[in-house]
Image (tube, rainbow, N blue to C red):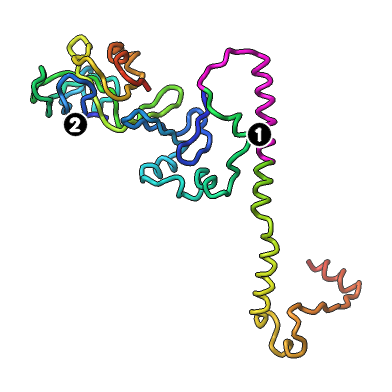
Amino acid sequence: MRLEKCWFCSSTIYPGHGIQFVRNDAKIFRFCRSKCHKNFKMKRNPRKVKWTKAYRRLHGKDMTQDSTFEFERKRNRPERYDRNVTEMTLKAIKKIDKIRVTREAQHHKMRMRGKKAIEQEAAIKELENSINLVKAPAALQQGSEITLPKIKVKVSQSQAVGERMEE
Amino acid sequence: MIQPQTLLNVADNSGARELMCIRIIGAGNRRYAHIGDVIVAVIKEAVPNMPLERSEIIRAVIVRTCKELKRDNGMIIRYDDNAAVVIDQGGNPKGTRVFGAIARELRQLNFTKIVSLAPEVL
């Protein structure tokens, strides 16, 4: 049993899923689901289709080079079964996956840094331009701050309790 | 899903280029033939100066279909064209070479000669 990669979206294909297409030159295209298969039949280039791994790697959205990818490279030499090696490999797979996930998260974080500052600036600008939607012009004339004033309202204890009872 | 009137490519060097299916062998009223079925076909197009000529009626075994082939392990395989290999009454191929990929199912159906000649068995 071998876990293959979908030719179109690069996700893993588990046994019993997907279709394999054999072209006349004996090249095999494996697809994880009919969505990828249909896109292939439409002759779409996976490097141009936004949700595929090929696009994401090409455009720097996902991590491209990492030592954790070396472990998943396809090796064509069959290994003689050794119980210890199998045990170690299974443990290693778990650890490597964890490391890869943390590194990808780090890559994402580095990619998204500075976004908060940009969003803040855009928000301030929008508030300045459209303050008329929030504050009446009369109030603006009195005080031209773009923040709403904090008003303290006194609520008596019995009143508050009464409201809760009604609910 | 090969039925009468279906045109098939020929995947060997027997001299025929294109076959048209006439009948499925071993099937009473069966509608379609799949990979591994023997069909009776007429040669629609032939290579000149070869033993097989146009409009000869021969038998062939289907080796590739555009319709998906389902395997017991859940694998589904689809080829790019419909192709057959010309055989004689005993099941031996008439040609000496086979072209293109061949499905593994032919081995179980005792077409071992074809499988051994195949460049790629998938």
Residue type, mark 1 in image: Asp
Residue at the location (86% across, 71% down)?
Answer: A160
Question: Which secondary structure lies at badge 2?
Answer: strand
> What residue did someone put label 1 on?
A97
Q: Could you say which is closer to the camera, residue A138 or residue B47?
A: B47
- Residue B94, horizontal then vertical, whole percent: 18, 14
Q: Could you say which is closer to the camera, residue A7 or residue B28?
A: A7
Say if the magenta span includes residue B3: no
The span picked out in magenta is A76-102
Q: Could you say which is closer to the camera, residue A163 or residue A40?
A: A40
Residue type, mark 2 in image: Leu
Residue at the location (50% across, 34% down)?
Answer: A5
Picture quarter containing residue A157?
bottom right
> What residue did someone put label 2 on?
B7
Q: Is residue B96 above or below residue A23?
A: above
Residue at the location (47% across, 32% down)?
Answer: A17
Picture quarter containing residue A141?
bottom right
